[in-house]
Image (spheres, rainbow, N blue to C red):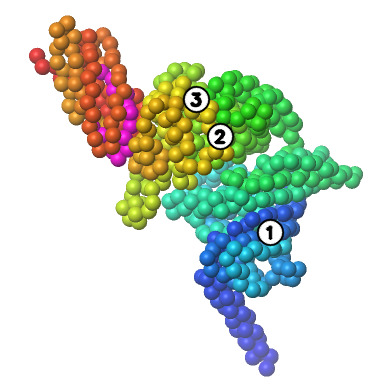
Amino acid sequence: MKALSSKIGPLLCSLCVLCALCVLCDKALALDREAFTFTKYDLDVRIEPDQQRLGVRGKLTVRNDSTTPQADLALQVSSSLDWRSIRIAGKPAQFVTHEYTSDVDHTGALSEAVVSLPHDIPPKSTLEIEIGYEGTIPLDVTRLTRIGVPEDKAKHTDWDEIGKSFSAVRGIGYVVWYPVATEAASLSDGNSVAETIGRWKAREAQAELKAKLTNSGEGVPTLLLCNGEGSQQAQERMSKHFANTTECRYPTLGMTVPLFAIGSYSGLDKPPVNISYLADHKSGAENYALAANLAAPLVKEWFGGSQPATDIRRAEVIELADPDAAPFESGTMLLTPLVDSDSRLYLLRAVHQLTHAAFPSPRPWIYEGLAHFAQSLEREQQNGRHAAIDFMGQHRAAIVDTEKAIAAEHSQTTAAGESLINTGIEEFYRSKAMYVWWMLRDMVGDDALKKALAAYRADDDKETAYIQHLIEAQSKRDLEWFFDEWVYRDHGLPDFHVESAYPRSTVDGHSVVTITIENLGDAGAEVPVSLRFDGGEATKRLEVRAKSKAVLRLEATGTPQEIRINDGSVPESDLANDSYKIEVKP
Ligand SMILES: [Zn+2]
């Protein structure tokens, strides 16, 4: 009898496991993870840096935004956290948890709770849920090392952790420290991570998040900083023990990724920036403040007119403890190491940050594109047009590669193009958008573009063509074709070459060269064309539409030698065919 039960025992047990797995599989298959929008978060977050621990209790409101009634709900947090309780209408809810592989978290996985709802939730209905989860947030580079990034490099990119002396934790895309619900995404699968996070942010743009964050420990109290509004501080102290509470509110999340940092911060408040720096780094903070001061006039000249000066948000800088950490920006807040003595680097970062503060826009290609464009303007102001073009050139290869990858994807799946107005790809809404702004500036001139930008109001930007019309009104130029090929659709990049060049002598002994330029690409552009001759150079701009040819004439006062298309200000797929030697017939 004893022998029998000892055999049945494990058998029953493995059956249980099997049942549990089946239930889980069934649910996972039927589950629409992106059916619910999380409309409201009210979280009580307790952080114990000494233990690297995070514990959260709170309430969520979710709304079924799908078209069918939902019987289950997915709740996901970082895989280093565990679900402790889920209650609906005051009663414990039924749920199963499992690890869900996804690269929207630094650990490369999520702790997913699949909740069986007490009754089906019809479309448009909301539900309130009480939740509890906890665990640790250590430094974790799993998702990067498994795609081959060396660990030493990875830890300066995925630097998020709750650590004894310093903590910095970003939200979705880095550490899922508040609950989300997304389909799996993998860094080895094209742009799936960016696309998944983009979908989540779009769904959550109107959501409200309130978090009461308490950091506690022994010894010297540390300060918690976050990127929300209305932070209030409450301090408790009992002998060696301290507890600091900070309220962080996000009335609407917009594109913000909620983040917090904890450290022994000191403050340096020097308009236009407010800097929180770590011990011994006051000189770094002062260098940054100086750079911001130097950057301010250029930013004001180009971007200062779109909102009243009193509405311009102060730029915030929060120092990261790792001196090699990759900087991270969230709206007008910048997380960055402050140990650099490279003043040029600080100047570039400050120009970018102040442009964000001066020029809010709900459209990433405008918001980020202009901040990067401002950096090229700054390079131009310091060292001339060549320096600006060199600076932009650092982004060109990434744009070309991304266009190629998308083109390859299209031929397989005929997916919709990654237009600047829709894209979630950084190489596009940052780098490609920067070039688009530079090309527009070259086309319409500084004055017209500055006036158009000054007329821009973020609240009025409802139609995709709003900015196009502002620029057209100032420049009196039809820009529809340009916006259509570069902004509203993704037409790839132009590819120019000289089709023919005919020099002809003039009566005054000079010569005129008739040049035909062909654009092999699907995006048109206005491009500078230069003719080098003995003793000089002549340059004109020429509009060459997609898959078209255009002709211009350039005059030479000496023997014509070489034609050069594109000084680098137009991003082209192929630069190798941009020069053309003129053979002078004897
Ligand atoms: Zn930015």
Residues at marks 1 and 2, CA–CA distance in whole angstroms: 33 Å
Left or right: 367, with 400 as reference point: right
- Residue 524 shown in magenta: yes
Q: Start and end of the magenta stretch?
A: 518-531
Q: Work out whether 281 lies above or below 432.
A: above
| Quadrant housing residue 72 | bottom right
Q: Earlier in the sequence, mark 1 or mark 2?
A: 1
Q: Work out whether 549 lies above or below 245.
A: above
Instruction: Say which mark, if any, is on residue 22.
Output: none
Q: Nearer the viewer, residue 552 or 215?
A: 552
Q: What amino acid type is highlighted by mark number 2?
A: Arg
Q: What amino acid type is highlighted by mark number 3?
A: Lys
Q: Residues within 10 Å of mark 1 (few under 14, many from 20)?
A: some
Residues at marks 3 and 1, CA–CA distance in whole angstroms: 45 Å
Helix, strand or loop for the magenta stretch, by majority: strand
- The secondary element bearing badge 2 is classed as loop
**Mark 1 = which residue?**
60
- Residue appearing at x 60%, y 22% in the figure: 296
Q: What amino acid type is highlighted by mark number 1?
A: Leu
List x then y, in percent, for residue 366. Answer: 50, 36
**Mark 3 = which residue?**
451
Q: Earlier in the sequence, mark 3 or mark 2?
A: 3
Q: Nearer the viewer, residue 543 or 434?
A: 543
- Residue appearing at x 34%, y 47% in the figure: 407
Q: Nearer the viewer, mark 3 or mark 1?
A: 3
- Residue appearing at x 10%, y 17% in the figure: 585
Q: Nearer the viewer, residue 569 or 7?
A: 569
Instruction: Say which mark, if any, is on residue 457.
Output: 2
Would residue 198 be visible to someone looking at this image? yes
